[in-house]
Image (cartoon, grey):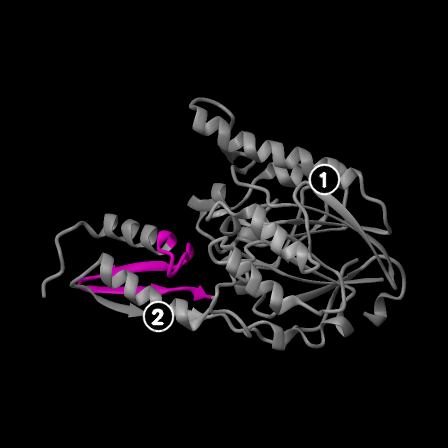
Amino acid sequence: MIRLAASADVHFGTESAGTLRPQLTDLPERADVYVLCGDLTRSGDANEASILAEELAGIEIPIVAVLGNHDYHSGQEDVVRKVMEESGVTVLEGEATTITTAGGRVGIAGTKGFGGGFAGACATEFGEGEMKSFIGHTKMLSAKLEDAINSLNGDARVVLTHYAPVKGTLVGEKLEIYPFLGSYLLGEAVDRAGADLVLHGHAHAGTEKGVTPGGIHVRNVALPVIKHVYNVYCFGGDALDSC
Amino acid sequence: MDAPAEPKHYLVGHIREALAQDARVNELTIQVTIAGEKIFLTGNVATAERRDAITEVVGEVAPGYNVHNETTVQAYEAAPDAETLS
């Protein structure tokens, strides 16, 4: 059994110091891995990332993250990533990592992802260059995510995105903004490659629980959705009752 | 002071744009409702400082309106029991 703690959209600013760490003191007793599904910072400023890195320092379980759209706002996403990685957080963008826990090995693949909408009501790579660029970006990230999932070894596979891979976890959001909240291309990549669980954020007014068309669990762990500092998901292996 | 004559539909858009762009806030999920000379703001923000900044920014974008900032600050409640996925 693998115990995974997850949240998203902490939106750390330079004023956020001390707001998160007090709630993470028992995290190592409750989970084997902690994942953050994007929007680590308010505006993608390196100083904001440093504040969050300090907040997470010394937590004695592996931490894995993807970046979100807020982390790109200042054009310092590479610096944000570097700051987090220097503090020991593994940041994934079309990449994968495998972590050995007491309950087994868990492979984690991740990407920020992007928008475009969902099958039947989605944008296509047609027309203006800006439109082609928009959907082309999602296609590129989805393809890299699929490759990353396929590269995973482990007893369980987990996928992290910031943007939503299904519309089921967007229920509560305005329909008009679904194309800016996620894309079916992410869900399709996950279904083709296979996984046990997909975690995402970004949709603050959405719903926690969903499923891909291929039957894979999806959880929207945006803080305003889960309303807790993190949720814990247990999966894989035996002894599930002890979770 | 009378509220300006800008159509409210567009003003909602301008306020949301300012809340996203202004470095004091950078919030994309605040709901804006205009009723007469009142602007109601709802949603969830990460810190009390950002909540206060929202009032400032909206006051600058929409002078003459009464700003009712009803946003809430994200609470970090302790994690609930784990969910076991089957």
Q: Amino acid at mark 2?
A: Asp
Q: Is residue B65 left or right of residue A52?
A: left
Is residue A163 visible in this depiction of the protein? no
Q: Is residue B31 magenta?
A: yes
Closer to the camera in the image, A37 or A22:
A22
Q: Residue at x 51, y 26 (%)?
A: A125
Q: Is residue B12 left or right of residue A222?
A: left
Q: Residue at x 24, y 57 (%)?
A: B61
Q: In x, y percent, where is residue B80?
A: 67, 73
- Subunit that carries the residue with mark 2: B
Q: Residue furthest left?
A: B1
Disc 1 secondary structure class:
helix
Circle 2 sits on which residue?
Answer: B52
Q: Is residue B4 magenta?
A: no
- Subunit that carries the residue with mark 1: A
Q: Residue at x 42, y 44 (%)?
A: A176
Q: Residue furthest right?
A: A238
- Point out the stretch of residues depicted in magenta: B20-45
Circle 1 sits on which residue?
Answer: A191
**Tally of numbered discs:** 2
Q: In x, y percent, where is residue A204?
A: 50, 58
Q: Amino acid at mark 1?
A: Asp
Q: Are marks 1 and 2 on the same chain?
A: no
Q: Up-down: is A229 above or below A7? A: below
Q: Which quadrant would the C terminus of chain A be assigned to in this image?
A: bottom right
Disc 2 secondary structure class:
helix
Q: In x, y percent, where is residue A239?
A: 89, 66
Q: In x, y percent, where is residue A94?
A: 68, 40
